[in-house]
Amino acid sequence: MVSRVIPVDPFDLVIFGGTGDLARRKILPGLFRRFCSGQMPDGAQIIGAARSDMDDAGFRAMVGEAIREFGGGRHCEDGTLDAFLEHIGYVTVDARGDGGWHDLKARLRDDKVRAFYFSVGPGLFGDLAERLRGFGLADDESRVVVEKPFGKDLATAKALNATLAQHFDETQIYRIDHYLGKETVQNLMAVRFGNVLFEPLWNAQYVDHIQITVAETVDVGGRGGYYDKSGAMRDMVQNHLMQLLCLIAMEPPARFEPDAVRDEKLKVIRALDPVDYHHIARGQYDADEHQPGYREHVGDPRSKTESFVALKCHISNWRWAGTPFYLRTGKKLRARTSEIAVVFKDAPHSIFGADAGHHRNVLAIRLQPNEGMTLDVTIKEPGPGGMRLVDVPLDMSFAEALGPEVEEVPDAYERLIMDVIRGNQTLFMRGDEVEAAWAWTDPIIEGWQKRGEVPKPYDAGSSGPEDALMLMHRDGRKWREIKA
Ligand code: NAD
């Protein structure tokens, strides 16, 4: 397979928070890889802007170090890093002060695409937006990129949207959910809407249920303070899992265009029924003799925040009435894996009799690791002695199917930043989508708080608390195994 790289237009990209963790780990190495691939034009300028007192040379040294630590591309040749660093500059600005803004403005060019990446805490979004307009750095063509978390509930998300809307039109705002930038997530749409095979069966008549799993092996690490105020529901379900749910459940948009896709996603969220609290399992990883548990990690022996959540939900529309969707995500689980499994119903009648047993097709889409797809198909077990059936997977790893070039497929951040420069909002969340997602998750979280609910402990390295298994078991179903 030959990878086709179409260069983007020349641009000025200002990264507020350019010295921070996200910029060093993801944004800058991602930009470097796009540079290596030849996608970045000569007229590209990337300016770090943060509070630290630093000059261009100091920032370039920091960026070089970050790229060496967090990865360049396989095809980056020697000397490419120096060439990339020539595109980098730095201006000291305080989002809450007035110093530095004129200097920053003087660096920007009038005839280039202009984008501002807010890689800072959401508390600074308003200050940045106001100063960008006030000092005349941003106009009606400029783009702003904002990071998660986008609020911590409906009220705060609305306030953030309102703040941004005072200064920018919705068409200028790019809310990042990096899951949407993953290759396989976009493949969900290609698989559904690029093939005739699946779509006729993609409904409650043929689909028994759908499972969405995002399992991590890591603990809360250094993010304990932040995480304990958030929890798995806010940190993962409200954004990443709901985005996956939308893509798997939405109606075919008429075109692969930003608002056509986002309108359909929004309809899914709005069709979600409220979740019965009996259909939710919450957990917290426990300590064992080798390692501390969640509560030790966050430094609060009485923390009621969940590091695991599993739930069953229903989408009340013609396509999905009667087909449950099971979502689960958690930390410190058995394996790091993200997967969507569409479990089809049994054949309506078995011509092979009771001995053949129950069989069903399962389409599993693996987001990580080893991106790919498996379709379980029922065939005859080889050998004499009657018609015994067995399910075998048609297993496709994208890396194997597409060849070595696939390793150079851009990671989520690379792709999304290039989409910002191209002005394509399809893979970014619209304000009303984010608000609708909070409107659905808020009552769940408020219910836990009202009832003073304490998450159930689960063993590190397990597949979550017993309650999560029971959630499926009660319905006569079973989670797919969490395996790498
Ligand atoms: P960080 O604390 O490492 O960096 C913050 C950056 O903001 C620094 O460059 C700092 O100089 C700058 N800054 C702080 N106050 C400022 C001010 N008043 N004026 C100008 N600059 C100021 O944070 P981070 O981990 O890089 O996260 C940045 C944003 O991205 C946050 O909203 C975070 O929630 C989000 N995010 C981070 C990650 C991650 O992996 N780090 C993942 C997803 C989302």
Image (spheres, helix red, strand yellow):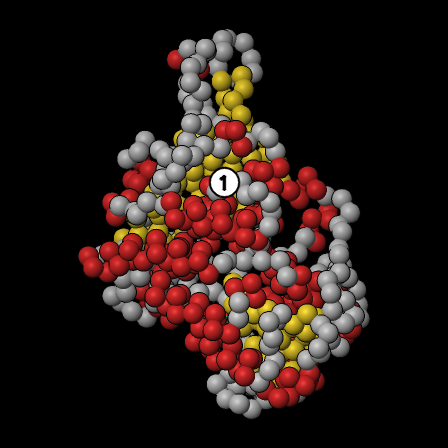
- Residue name at image x 30 percent, y 47 percent: 275
Residue 25, above or below 54 = above
**Which residue is at the front of the view, 63 or 106?**
106
Apparent side of residue 183 relative to residue 223 in the rendered image (left or right): right
The kind of residue on which mark 1 rests is Glu
Q: Does the beta carbon at disc 1 come under 8 Å from ligand 1? A: no
- Of 26 and 243, nearer the camera is 243
- Name the residue rendered at 25%, 48% in the picture: 277
Tell me: residue 386, above or below residue 89.
above
Residue 423 screen position, x and y as percent = 64, 61
Which corner quadrant of the image does residue 40 belong to? bottom right
Q: Position of residue 266 (x, y in %)?
A: 45, 50
Residue at 39% across / 70% down in the picture? 159
Mark 1 surroundings: few (<14), some (14-19) or many (≥20) residues within 10 A: some
92 relative position to 235: left or right = right
Q: Judge whether residue 370 can be spotted in this image.
A: no
Most foreground residue, 133 or 65: 133
Q: Dot 1 corresponds to which residue?
A: 251
Residue drawn at the location 56% of the way across and 35% of the way down: 374
Residue 324 showing in the rendered view: yes
Q: Residue furthest top?
A: 385
- The x and y percentages for residue 347 are 45, 20
399 displayed left or right of 384: right
- The N terminus lies in which quarter of the figure? top right
- List the single residue furthest toward the bottom: 99
The tally of labels here is 1
Mark 1, secondary structure of its residue: loop
- On the image, the x and y values in percent for residue 484 come to 51, 45
Q: Nearer the viewer, residue 362 or 126?
A: 126
The residue positioned farthest toward the left in the image shown: 451
